[in-house]
Amino acid sequence: MSLLTAIGRGYSLLYQYRCEEAVKAFDELPPHQNQTSWVRLQVARALYESNQYERAKRIYNEIHFDDPHLHQDMDLFSSLLWHCQDKFDLSKLAMDL
């Protein structure tokens, strides 16, 4: 039950726009949970919301490489690439999806 509590705490912090705290909460999860696509998406979203675009971009790229058929939050990834003016990766993402 403590695992669900920890995940819920990070998720709650993220949707209260307490992004730095959310990243810390997700980082405290056990490694086998911390490396799931869902948790990494939440961390990337928190970094995106706190304007840490380069870190978020790195995580989104890793997620897309590891799980190319995952479409969840790819709209945020494309927005991030647009903000970074990364036309090459934005075009590549559009072709992949």
Image: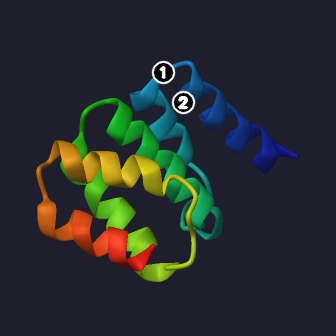
Q: Is residue 6 left or right of residue 24?
A: right
Q: Which mark is residue 47?
A: none
Label 1–label 2 contact, CB within 8 A: yes
- Position of residue 72 relative to residue 91, above or below, is above
Q: Position of residue 24 (x, y in %)?
A: 46, 39
Percent across and percent down for residue 7 are 69, 44
To which residue does mark 2 refer? Answer: 14
Task: Please name the residue shown 58% across and 57% down the image.
Answer: 72
Secondary structure under badge 2?
helix
Which three-letter amino acid code belongs to the residue tagged 1? Tyr
Amino acid type for the residue under numbered disc 2: Leu
In the rendered view, would you say 28 is above or below 52? below
In the rendered view, would you say 38 is above or below 52? below
Q: Residue 5 in the image: x percent, y percent?
A: 78, 38
Which is nearer the eye, 16 or 20? 16
Kindly identify the residue that appears in the image at 46 percent across and 47 percent down.
43
How many residues crowd mark 2 within 10 Å: few (<14), some (14–19), many (20+)? many
Residue 76 drawn at (x, y percent) = 41, 47
Q: Establish if 70 lies above or below 52.
A: below
Based on the displayed image, in which of its 4 quarters is residue 23 positioned? top left
Secondary structure type for disc 1:
loop
- Please report the residue visible at 63 percent of the width from the left and 35 percent of the height from the top: 11
- The residues tagged by marks 1 and 2 sit, at their Cα atoms, a distance apart of 5 Å
Residue 17's label in the rendered image is 1
Q: Residue at x 56, y 18 (%)?
A: 16
Left or right of 96 on screen, residue 50: left
